[in-house]
Amino acid sequence: MRMESGTKIPSHVAIIMDGNGRWAATQGKPRSWGHAQGVESIRACIEAARVAGVGYITFYTFSTENWGRPESEVSALMDLLCEGIVNETPELARQGVRIVVIGGRGALSDKVRTHIDEIEQATAGGKNLTVVLAINYSSRSEITRAAQQIAARALGGDLVPVMVTEQTFAEELYTSDIPDPDLLIRTGGEQRLSNFLLWQAAYAELLFLPVMWPEFGANEFNEALAEYARRERRFGKIDN
Ligand code: IPE
Ligand code: IPE
Ligand code: MG
């Protein structure tokens, strides 16, 4: 589906990719198979976002809460992540796509950290689209960490508490140089944020879809853009 000219395109689309495990179960396959199929959906969305002229696309890849899954599923997810990075880096770099990772890196293995560093470096010059991967991400941890950094700066005499603004706060988040999402999509039928971009999504348009993530492709992405274009964003004001 092509977007009509003059259609509002979101600068930043954030996606909670949910439903891999349930989708795999419907196919009589293990959950890890669902995750592997989900990588195809990521590829399709990156391409569709680039074609549509979206500036930023964020994928919720692994939450801090996901460590609570069985060890075998966690390691399958980490292996897929490393494999995806190795396989996709050359093509993404060629397409001018920049990859940025947000989340706590300390808890990741050396191998995953090395792959993350490599893809960030290899794609740093990309100007056509920024892909943000939220890995070991928790919005509450991110906000808490920002508060710690601001408190440390205040104690160090670098700033006075009354001078702390929303801007000061936003600058201490992982997303300091990423605009707030305009459109937040969650696949898989659940209607919750699961600790994702709580600060940043204050005024995002929310779109909860029943489709499972492995079934989400370019057509579904373009449909979501069309739905966004139909929304009226008021930001608390009223129409004139
Ligand atoms: C989303 O799919 C992928 C991750 C959380 C990493 P799920 O694995 O949550 O799949 P469901 O929701 O159990 O079907
Ligand atoms: C959210 O999905 C996390 C990611 C997509 C990475 P979950 O499946 O982990 O969320 P809950 O458990 O349904 O809230
Ligand atoms: Mg889930």
Image (cartoon, rainbow, N blue to C red):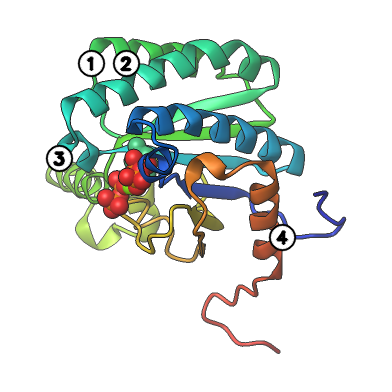
- Taking the spot 49% from the left edge, 59% from the top edge, the residue there is 210
The residue beneath circle 3 is 156
Measured Cα–Cα span from mark 2 to mark 1: 5 Å
Residue 23: x and y, percent?
Answer: 43, 43
Tell me the amino acid under the disc marked 1.
Answer: Ser
Local secondary structure at mark 3: loop
Image quarter in which the C terminus is found? bottom right
Asked if disc 1 and disc 4 are in contact, CB closer than 8 Å, the reply is no
Residue 94: mark in rendering: none
The outermost residue toward the right is 5
Local secondary structure at mark 1: loop
Measured Cα–Cα span from mark 2 to mark 3: 34 Å
Above-or-below relation of 48 to 209: above
Residue 109: mark in rendering: 1
In this image, 72 relative to 39: left or right? left
Of callouts 2 and 4, the N-terminal one:
2
Measured Cα–Cα span from mark 1 to mark 4: 40 Å
* Whether residue 195 is visible: no
The residue beneath circle 2 is 112
Question: Disc 1 or disc 3, which is closer to the eye?
Answer: 1
Above-or-below relation of 153 to 234: above
- Taking the spot 15% from the left edge, 42% from the top edge, the residue there is 152
Asked if disc 2 and disc 1 are in contact, CB closer than 8 Å, the reply is yes
Residue 114: x and y, percent?
Answer: 34, 10
Of callouts 1 and 4, the N-terminal one:
1
Of callouts 2 and 3, the N-terminal one:
2
Tell me the amino acid under the disc marked 4.
Answer: Ala
The residue beneath circle 4 is 226
Tell me the amino acid under the disc marked 3.
Answer: Gly
Measured Cα–Cα span from mark 2 to mark 4: 36 Å
Above-or-below relation of 102 to 2: above
